[in-house]
Amino acid sequence: MEIPGYIRQLYRPIQPTVKQSATNVTYAEFLPDESLQPFIYCYWQLKTQQPLNEVFTYRVVADGCIDIFFEPGHPEEHFVMGFCKQYTEFALDNTFNYVGIRFLPTMFPQLFNINAATLSNQASPLDAVVPATADFIRNRFHAQQSITEMKAILDKYFLDCLSNLKFNADARLYNAMALILENAGVVDVETGLDTGISPRQLRRLFEFYIGDTAKTFSKVVRFQNILRAKPSSQSLRQNKLFFDAGYYDQAHFIKEFKNFYGVTPSKAFGR
């Protein structure tokens, strides 16, 4: 298997559409250059169309990815968001224009040789993690640029990064990931991830390249699979989707979903 491309084929993480102030806040995703797509899932932009009447709370659901995000023209607003095992909320000002780069699982550590576990469950200043990238963003972006202009600049930068990449295609890690992704996260990590190494070694690989354990990553993949299915509240009750997705009862399903999303399934799907 071609490892980077294989991950994208099997996993398409999503973030729910902005709902709190839909007429004044927009969220959009943009594909990077085709050569980057096995590594970068998307670029994204979250911005206000006009000043809001109050502080905006933006909720990010668990998606198994690492993001760089920044606000053009504001040098202090450059961050890396690591792998998160629960939802995260950001209190934003009444005007903002954030641009982000969402890396597919394992790809941020591959590109920058950064231990993903050091970034998990927090937003870290980009200067402290990848100072060269922070300098690049600080010097090349400003608030008046269109997303098309910013995309072109980002494409060139990451294509240059890719040209110097020595990809660590550890088959033990990526075979385990393939099993998790192919089974939509419904896998017994104790018995179903036999890829030729000890559980301790596998845990070390997942923590470095993902940011958490194979078990936690599997849970996030399972959650994302349910998000993509967009079940109705009625089907959640009648079709027992939680059993099919590997949950042992409805209470377990609701608790885990709320941990990853921030609200119950019925509220998230709104029907």
Image: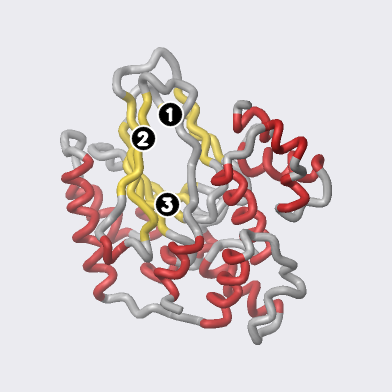
The answer to which of 71 and 160 lies nearer the viewer is 160
Q: Residue at x 73, y 52 (%)?
A: 244
* Residue displayed at 59% across by 69% down: 206
- The label on residue 92 is 1
Check disc 2 and report the residue beneath it. Answer: 46
Please provide percent x and percent y for residue 166.
35, 80
From the image, which quarter does the C terminus lie in?
top right
The residue indicated by pointer 3 is: 67
* First reached walking from the N terminus: tag 1 or tag 2: 2
Secondary element at image label 2 = strand
Report helix, strand or loop for mark 1: strand
Whether residue 77 is visible to the viewer of this picture, yes or no, is no
Q: Is residue 6 left or right of residue 85?
A: left
Q: Earlier in the sequence, mark 1 or mark 3?
A: 3
Residue type at tag 3? Asp
The amino acid sitting under disc 2 is Leu
Residue 135, x across and y down, in percent? 25, 54
Q: Residue at x 43, y 80 (%)?
A: 168
Across and down, in percent, residue 26 comes to 36, 29
Distance (Cα) linking label 3 and label 2: 13 Å
Mark-to-mark CA distance, 1 and 3 = 17 Å
Which badge, 3 or 2, comes first in the chain's sequence?
2
Amino acid type, residue under disc 1 in the picture: Leu
Q: How is the image coloured?
A: secondary structure
